[in-house]
Image (cartoon, grey):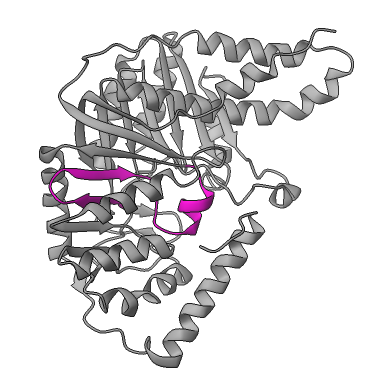
Amino acid sequence: MPTPDLARLSGWTMVPPPDDVGGNRVELLQGGDQLFPRMCQAIAAAREEVWLVTYIFHLDKATEAIADALVQAATRGTAVHLVVDGFGSLGPMTALRARFAGSGVQLEVFRPLDRWYSWLQVGQLRRLHHKLCVCDEDIAFVGGINLIDDRHDIHHGWVEAPRLDFAVAISGPLARSVHATARAMWARAHIARNWRDELRELARSSAPLRETVALVQRLRGRARPREQGMGGPVRAAFLVRDNLRQRRVIERSYVEAIRRARVRVDLAVPYFYPGQAFRRALRHAARRGVAVRLLLQGRVDYRIAALAAQALYTELRGSGVRIFEYTPAWLHAKVAVVDADWATVGSSNIDPLSLLLNLEANVVVRDADFAAALTAQLDLAFAQSQEVTAAPGRGGVRGWLQRALVAWLANVYLRVAGITGRY
């Protein structure tokens, strides 16, 4: 019996290492109101392939156009691959399967939770949190925006003001790195779904596994060689936090940028409970005169997450870090600007789930114009927020107990997920 080429299978599911390249065009997009029409245009123009990776795909009026674009692309012969997270899209999963059944859209679910025992399987706490779309390797979208109406929250219903969130549109060499990652996420979900059945059949025939290998090789053959000099002058890097080889790449990029900061650090994130190195970098930056501002949730969706962030208020404010709570709408942005030429937009929160468990993806942009555009949007958000000027009840023994409780809960969660060591 011939041995299946498992090495090629595993290699094809690996995400690329951080790739810092020039020659890109990078455009800042705010909210689904700006992102979704651009995605639909790119999908409509795709001729070879579309890869879409998202944590949440909720079928509503805002996202139905994307679903239509995917189906239309598959109908005209474009290879359309969609992967959603089994937890993030658990509620709309039945509707998603029905929507794309027989359409030609190749839907896969990352770590599905369709059986009660699925919750007990190893790795279920490590979710696919990416928000990626890439068409023909030419244009890619990366950010923190799920496929759901900006004014709708699955747990809290509809609101008037759209949530604050960002993404970027990328054309140029970096789009190929996004393509490789989106392809790897779909392949992991596809192989995991078929692996059990294939193992049962392996004793009788190696054909099922060979078919999966053939699929991987066929899709891999569609990749085109990288062309140099595409796009504009922007230098950018695509960072993927992965549980295999790149466990702390996003966290380290933040920490290194903050350590180099000389003028300002602006950071907006809904879930904030960083590790010791990250907090130390923020404190030291503020103490050496850098203007450090944090934009955190004012409208709380998960109480324990808010308590975790608030437990750090006294420590950070004592070093000169200014903290603002965003109240006009839900905060979902995961962005930062350091000085005048470093900015990041992506899916990664600054908490144990994103920094140590979930699969995350951020773009780091080294460009003054892009940093200025993001700074302008953040300045508007800070102006609409409430600055924390006191932290009543969080000092003394009560504050110490709150921090101890949050730290204990975080470490228990990480240990259940298989992560050991100090955070």
Image position of 386 with respect to 175: above or below: below
Question: Residue at point 31% right, 25% down?
Answer: 174
Question: Residue at point 44% right, 62% down?
Answer: 275
Question: Residue at point 17% right, 55% down?
Answer: 378
Residue sitting nearer the eye, 396 or 198: 396
Residue 374 position within the rendered picture, expressed as x and y whole percent measured from the top left? 17, 47
Residue sitting nearer the eye, 259 or 7: 259
User: Residue 285 lies in what quarter of the image?
Assistant: bottom left
Residue sitting nearer the eye, 210 or 57: 210
Residue sitting nearer the eye, 163 or 392: 392
Q: State the extent of the magenta-drawn residues as a range.
A: 333-359
User: Which residue in the rendered view is the most extreme toward the right?
Assistant: 204
- Quarter of the picture containing the N terminus is top right
Residue 22 position within the rendered picture, expressed as x and y whole percent measured from the top left? 22, 25
Asked whether, in this view, residue 152 is left or right of residue 292, the answer is right
Count every numbered label the image shows and give the total: 0
Res. 91 in view: yes
Image position of 259 with respect to 341: above or below: below
User: Which residue in the rendered view is the most extreme toward the bottom?
Assistant: 397
Question: Residue at point 65% right, 26% down?
Answer: 191
Query: Was residue 358 drawn as part of the magenta stretch in this picture?
Result: yes
Residue 61 position within the rendered picture, expressed as x and y whole percent measured from the top left? 35, 40
User: Residue 369 lies in what quarter of the image?
Assistant: top left
Asked whether, in this view, residue 222 is left or right of residue 380, the answer is right
